[in-house]
Amino acid sequence: MSTLALEGGSPVRMRPFPEWPVHDESDLRALREVLESGTWSAANGPRVRELERRFAAYHDASHAVATTSGTVSLVLALRALGVGSGDEVIVPPYTFMATASAVLEVNALPVFADISLDTYCIAPDAVEAAITPRTRAIIAVHFGGHPADMDQLGEISRRRGITLIEDAAHAHGAVWAGRKVGAIGALGCWSFQASKNLTSGEGGMITTNDSALAERCESLHDFGRSPGGPWYEHHFLSGNHRLTELQSALLLAGLERLPEQIERRERSARHLDSELGRIEGVRPLERDPRTDVHSHHLYIFRYDPEGFGGMSREAFVRALNAEGIPASSGYPVPLYRQPLFEELAFDTRATGYDPAYGPTQYGRLELPQCERACRETVWLPQNVLLGDESDLADITSAVRKVQEAARHGSGSRATSAH
């Protein structure tokens, strides 16, 4: 039996996984062209417009508006819909802060609906149960790159007269039932932050097939100006949320590489599903058969300590890290247990909410599927899926090595935090 690296043994892996972000000569050439052009701003530059056209076309959308971040995209999408004081927006609790904080930024109320443990996407039945007369929108997060159930959510949206927004920050290139995500709901919101599968360090995008919404988003991201209208004429209260030419140059280069990277991630994820799925105590997330393309921003599996001699998830992750595998525990608590929400108190005079629905609501929440996900999830970042077969074999070998040590009572330091 091999000694765990935490106990002084040799780690399974000494070399790094593929680095992220990826760049090559095409990025340098594109940046050099922008630098030498002297046109760095979206206000008068061609590359932002080219990016918007190509990104929209790639995702089968009629329109795209480039923004400074995924968070800003969500805020502007809500503002474009007129969501505001007195409104509710249904969001999942297993997601990044921005999905819900964007709702607060327009002075509306986030209402958390539980997730499915199969995919970690928002559960349509939970959405249906969370709808009230104040519900104006649903934000479906395509978590980890797996599309949310856009069939059921779309049906609920149409039947109840509620707008469906897609948070596609993890889902560049994902396809649900023959349709690219981000253009299925009324609005799709994207992130180009450093870890994302398409990145310029920071940045975002809004996609839509609705011309009126596209025009509103275009105005809101540019000081409330009318698209094509006078420079010094402002119709909405807003600011400068424009992407730069330099960022757009990087994204245009990255967009060329994206299809091949998606294929590699898909191939690697299928391999890990097969290999890790044979290990007791490891359960890769399921894939809905309507998911034609999974973009795999994360590779996720559920961890059961019973398959590892009682080793806690935290100890398991530490042991994997020591073996050279960049695993993490994901979100340790549901979003509604973040201090922002637990300590939030609404000014009911401003919002019109019933006081009984305000300050203590989030502190009382306990959504069981999300709570369970926070206890048993393990993430691997998307860049590990860009490796070769030997890289993937190291992941499986490290998991088996940790399991063997845990079952035989070795690795006392690793297993001490039960």
Image (spheres, helix red, strand yellow):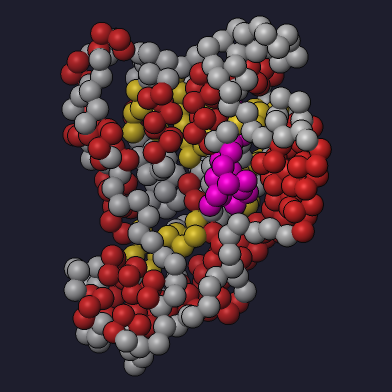
Residue 377 showing in the rendered view: yes
Q: Residue at x 34, y 28 (%)?
A: 111
Q: Residue at x 76, y 42 (%)?
A: 35
* 160 lies above or below 302: above
**Is residue 164 at all visible to an observer of this figure?**
no
Of residue 394 and residue 46, the one placed in the foreground of this image is: 46
**Residue that appears at 37% across and 55% down:** 330
Residue 133: quadrant of the picture: top left
Along the line of sight, the residue nearer the viewer: 63 or 350:
350
Q: What x and y, as percent, mark residue 410?
A: 24, 85
Image quarter in which the N terminus is found: bottom left
Tell whether 297 sits left or right of 405: right
Residue closest to the eye, 17 or 296: 17
Which portion, as a residue range, is magenta? Answer: 184-205
- Which secondary structure type mostly characterizes the magenta part of the structure? loop
Judge from the rendering whether residue 313 lies leftward or rightward of residue 38; answer left or right: left
Q: Residue at x 66, y 41 (%)?
A: 247
Q: Is residue 228 magenta?
A: no
For residue 176, side relative to residue 108 (left or right): right
Identify the image quadrant of the C terminus. Answer: bottom left
Percent across and percent down for residue 337 are 25, 40
The answer to if 204 sits in the magenta stretch is yes
Q: Is residue 268 above or below residue 192?
A: below
Total number of numbered labels? 0
Where residue 23 sits: x, y (%)?
A: 68, 58
**In which quarter of the view is residue 86 placed?**
top left
Q: Residue furthest bottom?
A: 1
